[in-house]
Amino acid sequence: MKYLQQEGRLLNWLKVMRVSQGFFFISAMPVLLGSAMVIYHYDVSVSPLVFFLMVIGSLVYHLGADMINEYYDHISGNDALVDVKTPFSGGTGILEKGLIRPQKVLYMSWLFFLIGAIISFIIAALTNDLILIFSALGLISCWGYTAPPLKFCYRGIGEIIIFLNNGLFIIGAIFMAFVEVFDPILILPSFFLGFLGFSIIIMNEVPDIRADQKVNKKNLVVRFGIEKALLFHKIAITCAFSCIIAAVALKQLPWPCLLAFAGLFMVSDKRIFNTKLVLDKMDDPESLTGLCKSTIELKFKSWLMLMIGFAAHGSWYYLA
């Protein structure tokens, strides 16, 4: 296969990195939420340098995870077997089209993981060594999601890894860096992001079910079937917003953070809340694309409204 005429094109690399799909920026969400919680509860100043390094570190780990996943799903033949293609599932298609050498994508993922690890050591030197615990958890889970020998997504625990990486690991690192304690107050807000991340991966796995079955990838959709998996999807969304209610009731979040519920009304495709409507169009790529997009949209808009709630509370506090 000829790669040389194409592999230098920046657009192909950006596609492999999934920069345009919204996944790339999800890892910045817990950094901002965790920092806001530290300021709210401890009234401490957050170092702009450490905050910046936290954002960059979380993003490069995410890039490494996406690219190593792209490589191993190509090598296994998983992505080539997907028969219902959407922009959010079945890989980017860049490797299947021969636009970049697969080995280069693997090497690039290693480079991103190395950069993330170096950033973690710099943060540890600026703050304390405890953040390296969460950095190691993030690195192992991102690398081992698809890569052997761990292959978490083949063993039925990939969704749990996504849940942890979308909230608890990063917010835990934020607390360790700025206040040097794993405070239980961070659990419910981190679970809010984790459950929404869980719902995203479930919806993205739905179009891949037949391909995942062929390569023996035993994720929740394969194990339990589409109908039950969509039930898990709705339960995860319910749990996410229940965490917000509980966190506000326990004064772990300021009450304006209830604005997060506005995200439920701001998604463009309300079918994500109706299992029957999803099942009726299981082989329609356009329909499934809308569902995947709306699940991502739900997380982004709910998180954004929650952060607006934090900002509103802070403005009221300082003006008063």
Image (cartoon, rainbow, N blue to C red):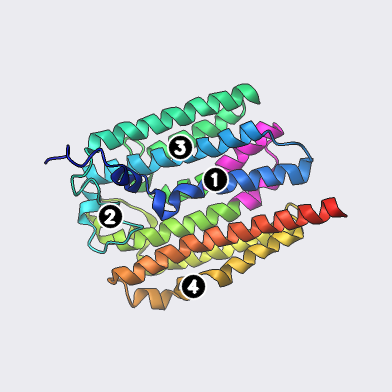
The reply to whether dot 1 and dot 4 touch (C-beta < 8 Å) is no
Q: Amino acid at mark 3?
A: Val
Q: Secondary structure at mark 1?
A: helix
Give the main secondary structure, helix, strand or loop, of the magenta stretch.
helix
Residue 160, position as x, y percentages in the image: 47, 49
Q: Residue 177: which quarter of the image? A: top right
Q: Residues within 10 Å of mark 2 (few under 14, many from 20)?
A: many
Marks 1 and 4, how far apart at CA:
26 Å
Earlier along the polypeptide chain: callout 2 or callout 3?
3
Decide which of 105, 275 is in the foreground and name it.
105
Q: Nearer the viewer, mark 1 or mark 4?
A: 1
User: According to the image, label 1 marks what residue?
Assistant: 28
Nearer to us: label 3 or label 4: 3
Q: Amino acid at mark 4?
A: Phe
Label 3, secondary structure: give it.
Answer: helix
Task: Report how far apart the C-alphas of labels 1 and 3 lie in the structure.
Answer: 10 Å
